[in-house]
């Protein structure tokens, strides 16, 4: 059974995923794969540097992510090129890792699941939901940005409603960290039971 975990920025996805991973569940992280695909020495990084020019590399030969983000932010063609280049490779690597997973269920952590329409990769979609005011406060505190910048970041993502519309299961992160972990444990138990039923 494959569970896709998603949620808005600073909603608590990593906290939930880490707890589930600590229980022996294989966690496949789309962001980590995306980073690995363009790590120094990879074909991915070479291809990107060839397309955008060597100035997208920093002095250590690593990808200057901030520069690349700026290059594609206001240029739909370049953004499309990058997405067409990376997304099939990310999906292929996720599929590969799914096929290697042996845990009772497999967790796919895909922050941009809705934006990239990837819900069909999973049997169930788990959304970590956070109320906007809490989310904005957490972004401001953690990332040292203004409220206006935090609002802009959230506005650039899928909306809370879009995520909730495709959710099979929802963890509402509206309390303490301890409460978040308790809700995660409860959800994990449900997945173990569901996986057992599916596998029997
Ligand atoms: P991002 O999308 O930015 O990677 P995320 O969705 O993975 O974020 P986390 O990294 O799990 O979210 O949480 C963001 C921050 O908020 C972390 O510092 C985490 O410890 C904190 N946090 C999450 N939930 C709670 C909570 N219920 N109470 C207090 N702090 C919390």
Image (cartoon, helix red, strand yellow):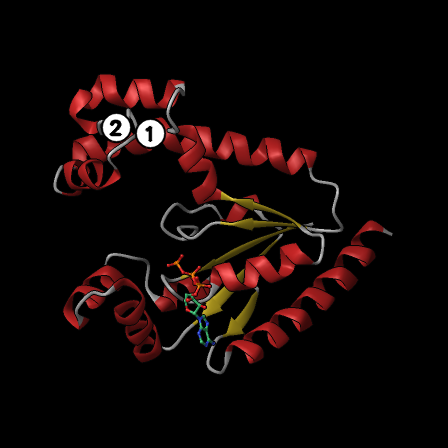
Q: Quadrant of residue 35?
A: top left
Q: Residue at x 41, y 36 (%)?
A: 34
Q: Are marks 2 and 1 in contact (CB under 8 Å)?
A: yes
Crowding at mark 1 (Cα within 10 Å: few <14, some 14-19, many 20+): few
Crowding at mark 2 (Cα within 10 Å: few <14, some 14-19, many 20+): few
Q: In front here: 48 or 194?
A: 48
The spot of residue 147 in percent (x, y) is: 18, 72
The spot of residue 99 in percent (x, y) is: 67, 34
In terms of secondary structure, where does tag 1 sit?
helix
Q: In front here: 174 or 181?
A: 181
Mark drawn on residue 84: 1
The spot of residue 153 in percent (x, y) is: 24, 60
Residue 167 appears in the rendering: no
Outermost residue on the bottom side: it is: 175
Q: Quadrant of residue 182?
A: bottom right
Mark drawn on residue 106: none
């Amino acid at each position: 059974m494959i569970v896709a975990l998603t949620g808005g920025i600073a909603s608590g996805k990593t906290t939930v995923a880490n707890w589930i991973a600590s229980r022996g569940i294989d966690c496949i992280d789309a962001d980590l794969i995306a980073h690995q695909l363009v790590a120094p020495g990879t074909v991915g990084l070479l291809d990107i540097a060839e397309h955008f020019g060597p100035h997208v590399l920093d002095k250590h030969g690593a990808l200057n992510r901030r520069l690349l983000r700026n290059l594609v932010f206001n240029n739909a063609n370049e953004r499309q090129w990058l997405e067409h280049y990376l997304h099939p490779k990310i999906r292929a690597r996720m599929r590969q890792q799914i096929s290697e997973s042996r845990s009772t269920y497999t967790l796919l952590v895909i922050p941009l699941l809705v934006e990239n329409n990837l819900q069909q990769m999973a049997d169930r979609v788990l959304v970590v939901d956070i109320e906007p005011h809490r989310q904005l406060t957490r972004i401001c505190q953690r990332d040292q940005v203004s409220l206006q910048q935090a609002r802009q970041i959230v506005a650039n993502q899928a909306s809370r409603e879009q995520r909730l519309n495709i959710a099979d299961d929802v963890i509402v992160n509206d309390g303490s960290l301890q409460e978040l972990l308790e809700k995660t444990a409860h959800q994990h138990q449900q997945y173990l039971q569901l996986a057992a039923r599916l596998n029997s």
